[in-house]
Each structure stands twice: as C-alpha cells, then as structure tokens.
Image: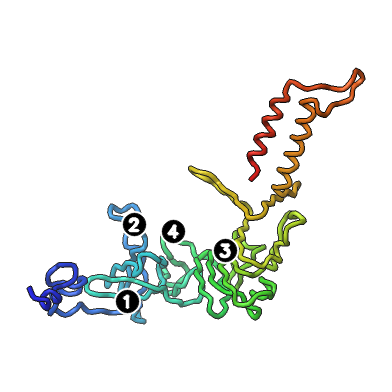
Amino acid sequence: MSKQKHLNRPAGGRKGSIFGFGDSLNSKPPKFETFIGVVQGQAARREGENFTGVDSIVIVKDTGLQQDSTQQLTAKPLNPYFRSIPLSGEKVLVFQTGDASYYSDIINLSGKLGENVSQKDAAINEDASEFFFGLFAKPRETKKMDPTEGDVILEGRAGQTIRFSSTSEESFFGKLFGGKSENKPVIMITCNDDEKEGLGNEDIMEDDCSIYLTSETPIATLQLETKIHKGYEKVNEYADGQIIMRSNRLVLSSKKDNIILAAADKIGISTKKWVVDFDELMDVIQNIQKELDQLTKGAANFTTGVGPTGPTTNASLVAKIGSAIKKLKS
C-alpha cells in the first residue's frame, strides 16, 4: 500500500466513516441546524426502566407561534462535564445533526436566577394562573451577583455562587478589601438562602457559608465572634495569601486517616471562654510537669508540722510523663 493510500484511510481504522459524520469519504455530512427550543419536560421518569437522569429533555421548536407539542425532540446536554438542567417552559439553544439533538445554554428571558420561563409556555390553564416547572423544581427568588468587569461568575438557582474576580478600589471590592490592594486574584464561594431578587454581592459576615481564597489582600469587613491571641495580626488586616472558611458550623471528618494541622509559626484556638496559643499551652503543661516532678522525687517538698515531705510513690510515673512531653516538642 502506498503512502498516499494509507493517508486516505479514515481515522480509527473503520473503513468509510470519519467521526461518525457520513458513511464514506465521498458522502455528504448530515444537515446541521441550530434553533431555540422550548422545554416540555424530562425525557424519562425516575421510575422508568431506562432512566439515566433528568438531563435528557423533551423540546419543541420555538417558532414564535403556538407550540406544536406533536413535533417533539429529545435532546441531551451538549457538554457532558458541565450541565445546567432547564425547567419546563424555559428555552434552550439546540443543535441538531442527523438524528441527534443537543441543548446548550438556557436563554436569558427574564434575567432571573430562579427561573427564566415565558409565562405562556409554562401555563397549564387558559388564564395562565397556574404553571408547571417540573416534578421537583420549585422556582424561587434569588439575588444575582453584581459583576465587575472581567469577572467569571457561576451561579445556581437558589443562592449558590462561585466568583473568580480581582480586587478593585472602584468596585464594591474596594470596601470589602479595604482599598489596600489592586488587581489581586480572588475566588469566593458562597451559599446564601436569601429569597430576594435584584443585584447583590458577597457578604462574608452575613452569607450562610463562605470560602474565600485571596492573594495579598486583607478582608476588611471580616470580624470574629471571639478574640484572638494578642500576638497575632488582626484578621481584617492580614494582607497575604489566605483561605477563610466561615459558617454557623464547621465539621472536619476523616473517614480513614489523620487530620493534620501544621503551621509554619503558631496555631491559635479561640472560644467564648478561652484564647489559647498552642505553643504557650504546651509550655504551661511542660512547666507544671517539671514542678510536679521536683515534688514527687523529693527535690522540692512541702513543709509540714513533722518535717518536709520526701519522695512519693508516683515519682517514676511523673518522670515518664515528662519524657512523653519532651517527645512532643519539635
């Protein structure tokens, strides 16, 4: 076989087919069409035998007229790795090639996050007073994040957001970051059950849950519910790379192995009752052991009416405790 003949052979070694588009090199590719579709509902029910998820949907073409429900198509997500599942009545961008149909973005009809449904397309009665959005969906009011130029924002329907941004004195970040840094990278992951519409921004003090990743910038609005050790820099003034996690409750759970806390300098623990630097705590414990060791072996003693006390029966045990504490020190 010559080189030329070898190069003309289709990829994958399957004769007469390239990437599934056409039966041979000489055949025409299937017709490709792009249009807007109105979502009728999910293609299958959960109790169905061949159910693979609610991301396969039934659509009809949006012609601007009364929808013909008999001309239905089943469409799958265009991108299998990033899926935004539409509600019944929402409109999506559809790509059709051959017998396959795929849907992509939800059309921004109302500019809302809870739902983008044309009322007439979701109505289930003539006076459009009742609507069907899906078996499990319950649209709700949700604030949209107020974007600054260059932001990349991922938002859910119920107040979940991920924002990739940078610090700017001109935007709302000027207040959030104290105006002390400019054009520094920031990632904010938030969850807030605030059923209000309109534009909003992250609020590390008021949001239900927050994870901030910042670089060389302080979080000027951050305040803690308890005091921190006096030797530590204030949390709203620290201007270096940091990760901040905040919620009503934090749980760290290891299913199999260890939880490791390692600090280049110190570890501080603050509660409503105690403010503790871990190094200082261990120094206090070590000093208590040393004094107890002196008493138990008779190097130090108590003065009594019948003379000083001598060595005690647990002197060796106290000495072992001292040896164990020494091993903990790095």
Q: Are marks 4 and 3 in contact (CB under 8 Å)?
A: no
Q: Earlier in the sequence, mark 2 or mark 4?
A: 2
User: For the point 69% across and 26% down, which residue is it?
Assistant: 317
Q: Earlier in the sequence, mark 3 or mark 1?
A: 1
Q: Amino acid at mark 1?
A: Lys
Mark 4 element type: loop
Q: Farthest residue toward the right?
A: 305
* Any part of residue 194 in sight: yes
According to the picture, the residue beneath numbered tag 2 turns out to be 45
Q: Which mark is residue 136?
A: 4
Q: Amino acid at mark 2?
A: Arg
Q: Nearer the viewer, residue 320 or 162?
A: 320
Q: Earlier in the sequence, mark 2 or mark 1?
A: 2
Q: Which mark is residue 190?
A: 3
Q: Earlier in the sequence, mark 4 or mark 3?
A: 4
Frontmost of labels 3 and 1 is 3
User: For the point 32% across and 67% down, which residue is it?
Assistant: 76
As measured in the structure, the alpha-carbon distance from the residue carrying label 2 to the one carrying label 1 is 22 Å
Q: Which mark is residue 316?
A: none
Quadrant of the drawing holding the N terminus? bottom left
According to the picture, the residue beneath numbered tag 1 turns out to be 61
Relative to 296, does residue 214 appear above or below in the rendering? below
Mark 1 element type: strand
